[in-house]
Image: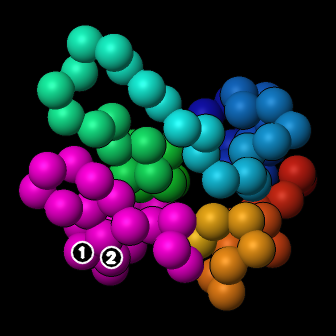
Amino acid sequence: MPGGVQQCVRCHGNDVWQSPPARAHGAATRPTKTWTIVCGSCHDSAGAQTHIAAGTAASGYESCSVCHDVGREYAVEPAHFVR
């Protein structure tokens, strides 16, 4: 990682702390695992991966936004900020 984990903006710009944007792939037969891929790339401990898996259905649908979307109790923006 260029600059280490303390310099997120080097790769992600100034919006790394926001909820992952919706990703739609017209030819896809299953939903894209937006939160799983984005959040799981940094939150890669066994506990975090178990938490992510628990919120992701076998069909690919994710329930992450119920707790972690903007304005929710465990929203990502208070914990993630431009460093």
Indicate the quadrant where residue 64 lies. bottom left
Q: Name the residue under label 2.
A: 51
Query: Residue drawn at (73%, 52%), measured in percent from left and top?
Result: 18
Percent position (x, y) of residue 59? Answer: 14, 50
Q: How crowded is the residue under tag 2: few (<14 C-alpha within 10 Å), some, or many (20+)?
A: some
**Image vertical order of residue 23 relative to residue 76, above or below:** above
The x and y percentages for residue 57 are: 18, 61
Nearer-the-camera pick, 11 or 22: 22
Q: Which amino acid does label 1 sit on?
A: Ala
Q: Is residue 46 visible?
A: no
Q: Which residue lies furthest to the left in this view?
A: 58
* Residue that sits furthest to the bottom in the current view: 73
Q: In which quarter of the image is the N terminus?
A: top right
Q: Which amino acid does label 2 sit on?
A: His
For the residues bearing labels 1 and 2, Cβ distance under 8 angstroms = yes
Disc number at residue 82? none
Alpha-carbon span between mark 1 and mark 2: 5 Å
* Residue at image mark 1: 54
Horizontal side, residue 42 vs residue 18: left or right: left
Residue 63 falls inside the magenta stretch: yes
Give SS at disc 2.
helix
In the displayed structure, does residue 41 sit left or right of residue 71? left
Q: Nearer the viewer, residue 6 or 16?
A: 16
Q: Which residue is drawn at 45% across and 51% down?
A: 35
Q: Is residue 33 above or below residue 42?
A: above
Disc 1 crowd, CA 10 A, few/some/many (<14, 14-19, 20+)? few
Please state the extent of the stretch shown in magenta in the rendering: 43-67
